[in-house]
Every structure is written in C-alpha cells, then in structure tokens.
Image (cartoon, grey):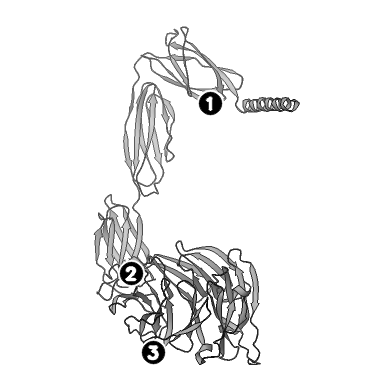
Amino acid sequence: MKKWIYFIIYIIIAVVACRKENDEEVRYGSLEGYVMNDYGQPLEGAMITVSNMVRESTVSGWFFFTSIPVGSYDITVTKVSFLPQVRHVIIKEDEVSTLDVVLVAGEPNLEVSDSLLEVRYFAGHEMITVTANATWQVDDDCPWLECSQQSGIGNAKLTLTWTENAGAVKRTGSLLIKSGSIEKKVKVIQDFPLKLLEVHGYVGNGMEGIVDSIYLHFNRPVTVNHIINDWHTCLCEIHYRMVEGRKGVIFSYACGKLGGLFPVSISVTDESGVTFDEQIQVPFYDGRLDLSGTMSDIHYTSDARYCWVAFKSPRMLYYISLDSLEIKRSISLSVKPRKITVNPYNQFLYVLAGDLNAYELDNNIYVIDQYTGALVKKITVLPEPGGHPSYPTIYPYDIGFTTTGYGVILLQQDGSSGVDWRIIDSSLGDTIYFHEDHDNELHYYNFARVHLNFDQTKILLTALYGGCDIVILDGYTHESFDLWPGSLTRGVFITPDRMRNRVYFGQLYDQFIMDFEGNMSQISYIDNKNEGSADFTYLPGKENIIYFLDNDYLQILDYDNSTTLMYCSAWYGMRGFTTSLDGVNAYACKTYNGTSWLWRFRTEDLWREAE
C-alpha cells in the first residue's frame, strides 16, 4: 500500500514540475486601452483584434486583454462607419501595456492597381499602387514572393519581388492586402523556363534502309531554328519533324552507333520568344556506368538484374544493380582477380587470381562471403603425383559450380601451354579430384571455358583450340556426355539458354541453336573472327531469335526463318552482350586504357523498326 502512495506522490510531483516548466517557457503580459472618436468621445462596440484574440470596447471605450504571450503585435481596431486602424504594440512580461486609439468617422476605402500579374520565369519585380484612406496590412505566406512593405496608412507604392522558377510547371502565389473588413488579393502566376526534358538516340535498321534518329522532348511547344551535327568525323543530312503538339522533335542522324554518345547543337524558340540554344550530348543507350580501372571479368545473376564485376586495377569487386546502374557493394582484394563466379550451393564468391599479361600466376582459389566481403578460406591447388616436375598444371583460369556444389576448375601451367581440369566439390568441403572420365578420351583434358545450363544442374565445357564439341557434366549423377554440333567450322563462343537446355553456337563461319538432344535450328553464316557475343531475346514467341554483337554491328537473327531482322552499327569493342531474363533490357561492357564501361539498352528500342 505504501508503495502505491509513494508512486502517486511521485506522479503528482512530476506533473506539477512539468506545468511549472511549461509556464516558465511561455511568458505573458497584458494590454488595455480606450477607443475614442476624433472628438474625444468613447466608442462602444469597437472590435480590437490581437493575433487570434478579439475584445469589444465597453460603453466607456475601454478594452482589456490578459495572458498575451510576450512579443510584438499588429493590433487591428475596427467599427462600423469608422475608418479602421492598425497599431503596433509590444507586450512585455508581467506588464500591462497601454494603447489608446482614435477612430475617424467615414467609410473605409481600399484599392489595388493590379489584381493579377503574369510574370516570366526569371527573377523580377513589379510596382503595385495601394489607394486607401485608412491603415492597411499585407499578409504574405508565399515563399517565392516578397512585398517591400507589410503595413501602412493611406496611399503607397509597393514593390513586389519574386525569385526564379526553376521548375517545369507554372506556379501561383498571392498577396492579401487588408484594411478593416476589406480585402484585396493580388494573384501572381509565374511562367516556367523552356527546358529539354528528354534526349534519346535510336539506332536504325540497315535491313530496311532506316537511318539512326534522335528524339528531343521539350516542356512546351517549340519552333526549330537549327540542328547541327557536331560529330565532325561524320557528315550527314538532317531532316526533322515535330510530334506531340510541337513539344517533341525527331530528326535523322546517320552518324549514330549503339553505345555511343554524340554531340549535337540544337536551337529552338517557344511561343513566348524564349530560345533554347545549346550543344547537347545524345546517348544511344538507356544508361551507362563509367568505372575507373581495368575490368577482368563480369558475372551476371541468372535473371541479369545484378552483376559482379572484377577489376584487376584497382583490385576490387563491385556488386552492381543493373536496374539503376549503381554500385551496391564493393570488396577490396589483396590479389588481382582474374575470374569470378558465385557458387549456387553456398552463395560464396569463388575468385581466381593472377595476371597473364604480367606473368603473374596464382594457384589459389579465394572463397569470399559476398555479403560481408570476408575471406572465408583459401583453397590451394597442389601438383598431382606424376605431373610435370618443373611446370605443374596448378593455376586455375576458369571455374563453375552446379546447385549441388559439384564443380569444375580448369588449370594451366606456368611457362608452357599445358592445361588440365579437375572436379571441385563444395558438398565435400571443396575437395579437388579427378573425374572418372578424365583420362578416357583425348579431348577430356583441354577445355577452354566453363558454362552452366539454365537451372545450374549441368556444367558445359567447351573445347580448347577451336574445337566445336561440348562436354556436359551432370551435377547430380556426375556422368558426362558429348554434344556434337551438326555443323562444324571452328568454335569461338557458346551462349547457354537461361530458360531451356539449349545452346547458341557462335562458330567462326556458321551459327545456330541446338538443344541437348541434338535438335538444331537453321544456320546463319557470319564472319565471327572478331570473337563476338550473343544472347537469346527471352521475349515470348521469339525463342529462336538471337542478338548477335561483334566489333562493328549488332544484328537480330531469326533462326526460324534464317533471316536477319535488323542490323545497326555498334560502338567498337563492346563485349559480353547479355539480355535480362524478362527480355526488357540488354547489357554490354568494355574496358580500355584504364577505364571500363557498362551499358544498358532497352530492347524495345532495338525492335522499334525491326518488325
């Protein structure tokens, strides 16, 4: 019981303390005075307003306010048939301020020279005339408008000032000028500047003789003064047309290339006479991420929404959102990353290190937690008994894992061209050993690349030295089988389908799609000596259509009908063309002279004229 009494006493003390503290925060004073006419006679029924408090004068003209927070106030005094007055008073703490007001008989009058001002987008000012026979005041709560005077008596000239409108729409503000019960509003409508809202380059279609074009979208209707191509290595005639109520301009531009950024000078004038005259940079892509350094490898997630990018200089790994082209995570390394992959069995990064160009080889596999960047462990590849005593085949150059943790590492020698391959099994603690078929066939020891099928249950090994066949290892049964293409020239690259058990063969002079049962599409005959790249469109109803990118061109190839639907020029040296699994975006990369680029393209732009 005593505990409860003590608790109640504590609460009472706390409440009283809070009230006292709050009372000390707000200080108060009082105001009293008399309202009389110009003959010195008291006026009953005059209305006196202080902030949001109102009092009425008594028969003797007296008024009184208590508990007014300390501060300065404009006091308004009004009465029917008398001219209103506004008086300024200062309320002091614990003091009674006095104010006597004399009202002059008459009807109030208030006029303002302008009730509506329509002004340009840039900063400016305008003079407004107030005609009044009494006191008046200005209410102004618009942050971009400012009046030179907040109150006055009789006639006056006010300067109304506004700031620049940097937005893309008109904005409206107002001033309210009051004298007694009379109110006059001055409305200000400010225009917005002429702006270029969107710039986009569209590749053409060489199959249909359609040149590249550029689209510009302004925030208001315009008239074109001139369009000049500033890419001086290319001369082209420009023809334009207006769209979207003259807010849009589309013009031909034969100098464009997929992935390029091109300068164009544009001059247009809007209906109010404002001119936009600038040199702009026109991107023939949807987005581009510029990275300082030399890229050594890129690993896309299965849906191509994110990717890991390895840099040997600086020694970094970047995890990048392909939707926003932003770096989400970065990992600093002590070694130069050569190859990177994500093991679907444990979600760790497996990094191969070294630099062939600098004759730096590393026989370790670095396992890294992709979320924390911590080194989980280092796996050292040791020489096998019976191997070359001086040049052991222990330096990894490619690696890949299935969902079961069953993987393959490809190995090379130092100082010799010898290569080999071994199994690495993460379900057995990343144990490294030989596959049972390792020595059964001659071609089972000279693989070039490790790929995975669509559900990451099978490993696809391409042959070294231009071989065309593929060896497929099952991640569950560990059995292997050969996939021989139905047409043979020389193997350059393959692209596994990420939705089905199929492969696109990008051979030297013939290319085609083939499933794991050996069913083959029609064939294209492209000179692939520049080691191009390709991917499936992943668009519904277009399962056998391929994007093919080499050093000079992007092509859209239809393997159902053995036709080229579209081709366009591409920025030289782009590599690794990859499509998102929803078919909406495509990506490519390039590294040159200490700088690397990652591009994003909207695939609908590639199909704009192809159909």
Most foreground residue, 256 or 531: 531
Disc 2 marks which amino acid?
A: Leu
Of discs 2 and 3, which sits in the foreground?
A: 3
Alpha carbon of mark 2 to alpha carbon of mark 3: how far?
A: 30 Å
**For mark 2, does the 10 Å Cα neighbourhood hold few (<14), some (14 to 19), or many (20 or more) residues?**
many
Reading the image, the residue beneath label 2 is 606
Mark sitting earlier along the chain (1/2): 1
The amino acid on which the numbered mark 1 sits, given as a three-letter code, is Ser
Task: Describe residue 178's horizontal placement relative to residue 414 as left or right.
Answer: left
Q: Which residue is mark 1?
A: 72
Q: Position of residue 381 (x, y in %)?
A: 63, 82
Q: Nearer the viewer, residue 490 or 284?
A: 490
- The quarter of the picture where residue 85 lies is top left
Quarter holding the C terminus is: bottom left
Q: At x 32% / y 38%, what residue is drawn?
A: 117
Label 2: state its secondary structure: helix
Q: CA distance from mark 1 to mark 2?
A: 68 Å
Q: In the image, which is nearer the foreground, mark 3 or mark 1?
A: 3
Quadrant location of the N terminus? top right
The type of residue carrying mark 3 is Thr
Secondary structure of residue under mark 1: strand
